[in-house]
Amino acid sequence: MARYKLLMSNEAEEFVSDGSVDSKGRPSVRAKSGGWRACSIIIGYELVEKLALYGVLANLMVYLTTKMHEGTGMGILTLTVSLKSLKPLECPSNEGCEKASFMQLGIFYFALYLLALGTGGTRPNLPTFGADQFDDFHPEEKMHKNSFFNWWFFVVFFGGLLGQTFIVYVQDNISWGVSYGSITGFLLIAYVVFMTGSPFYRYKAVTGSPLQRVGKVIVRMIQNWKIHVPTDASCLHEVDSKAYLSQGRYPITSTKNLRFLDKAAFLNSRHSNPCSVTDVEETKQVIRVLPIWLTVIFPSTIVAQSFTLFIKQAMTMDRHMGSNFEIPSGSIGVFYQIPMLLIIPIYVRLLIPLFRRFTGNPRGITILQRIGVGIILQGFAMVAAVLTEIVRLDVIQRHGIADDKDAVVPISFLILLPQLAIMGIAEAMVEVGKLEFFYDQAPESMRSLGSAMYAASGGIGSFLTGAILTLVTRVTGRHGHKSWVLNNLNASRLDYFYALLVVLNIINYAVFLTMSWSYTYKREPSEALGKDSSKATLLVDNSGQNDEGIQI
């Protein structure tokens, strides 16, 4: 049996105070694990992964139309772009081309789905794992943790920038096989480096399925529904705090919100196995973030426009910079990524210290305030998109090219820069805030669930992009009317569609603001353990001796 001791003061300074262990299950030594050293390896892997992801996405539409002739999976995807048998015959004119066979399409989409599956496994877990390298109970590490997600997204955006420049250049000027082969090689190297960092990582103890605990609370609450909600906390079941510490969890005292859930912990119920107060409070924390989660889905829908319609707009315009250089269509996102890269160091180094002077908040402003600022900026970006589209359509009408879907509009794509730049800054505010919020506000033992909620909001938002676009196309095209969004963007009314998104954004922001005003942030873990928690640590002794330690 493992033996746990709670040591105090200088004796415990060598070890972390949050119950983290090393790769062999021993208590993590602060000087030899975690911190930015471990995070640099995790972030390095994320950089390569995002380079691969954005390198694929940037020119995916181009590859589908010009190579497949259609309106970690990287290994298979590399084969599909390299082997002649896995793609149709070359067709330089892109007219009357042979369609991809069923087998060729099947392998291609299998590779994409495999890539998506791998991304789905790393996206919610890597940022959580990175943030877990910092100790909540150590003041200096806590400050580093507060800025971690900013630098995490800085690397994500930088990876996207490399993918949309370097990888796209190789695709356009050398070959698709070389570009995807390079990405596959980078991923293999990054994986090896990531695994070699195992001795330096801090790991959280496995505490069982968080959804199982939530489910148990809901079931017990329903079973005790007819019981009057107890007002005395002594009527509620709770276990000793040391039992939670031995599992890497923290006890939570009963709160007054969502009190109907307290029925699950009622001691005098007819059920002999009531839930603990901490289990109930963790369930409350999950339920409290759900309204916020619903309101941050639509901002992901707005963000998705920059990868679809904004890029398609640019493809209809003059993309030359100077007389000899034309920006590849897959690299338009660079003008979206650069503002994101610039705003993060400005925000961390300048704005947070400035705001902190007035608010006293270590983050400068609250997480929800940051998200709110981002949503407002998204609205401004869409307003700029409306105005830009009005100008583009005016040029089209004056030159009489509305019916020619292949005509290049004689106006520079640089007119799109305001909407791209504002949207990039908005995404830096919203996306960093979303991940930080769901990680921070999820129970300590359910932080992967919080990161999964963040990832799910982005996925659902992207799905809604297509759903809204399809619905608008069908509704506005009824009764012989011309649809707002057509395959021929020169004949479309994207200004109307963008204006609709502005209205929807205002409605969503109003709901978000209402939910934010009523939201109560959860306590820091150190508050739950008292004033000496910053000096406390849990040590695991595998000697198996039985004394004053806590047995598990």
Image (cartoon, rainbow, N blue to C red):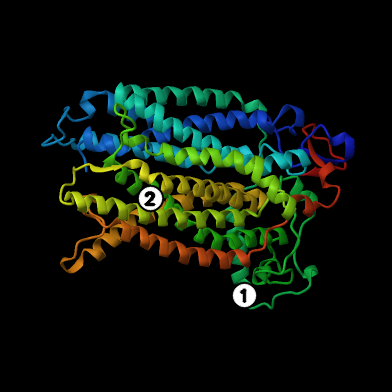
Indicate the quadrant where residue 494 lies: bottom left
Q: Is residue 94 left or right of residue 172?
A: left
Q: Which quadrant: the N terminus?
A: top right
Q: What residue is at 69 percent from the left and 78 percent from the top?
A: 228
Instruction: Give the residue furthest to the front.
Output: 398
Disc number for residue 305: 2
Q: Nearer the viewer, mark 2 or mark 1?
A: 2
- Residue 306 coordinates in the image, percent (x, y): 39, 47
- Residue 512 coordinates in the image, percent (x, y): 54, 63
Disc number for residue 456: none
Q: How many marks?
A: 2
365, above or below 176, in the image: below
First in sequence: mark 2 vs mark 1: 1
SS type, badge 2: helix
Q: Is residue 430 left or right of residue 519?
A: left
Q: Amino acid at mark 2?
A: Gln
Q: Does the rendering let one see residue 55?
A: yes
**Residue closer to the observer: 232 or 11:** 11
Q: Does the rendering let one see residue 72?
A: no
**Residue closer to the observer: 138 or 218:** 138
**Residue closer to the observer: 538 or 304:** 304
Disc 1: which residue: 225
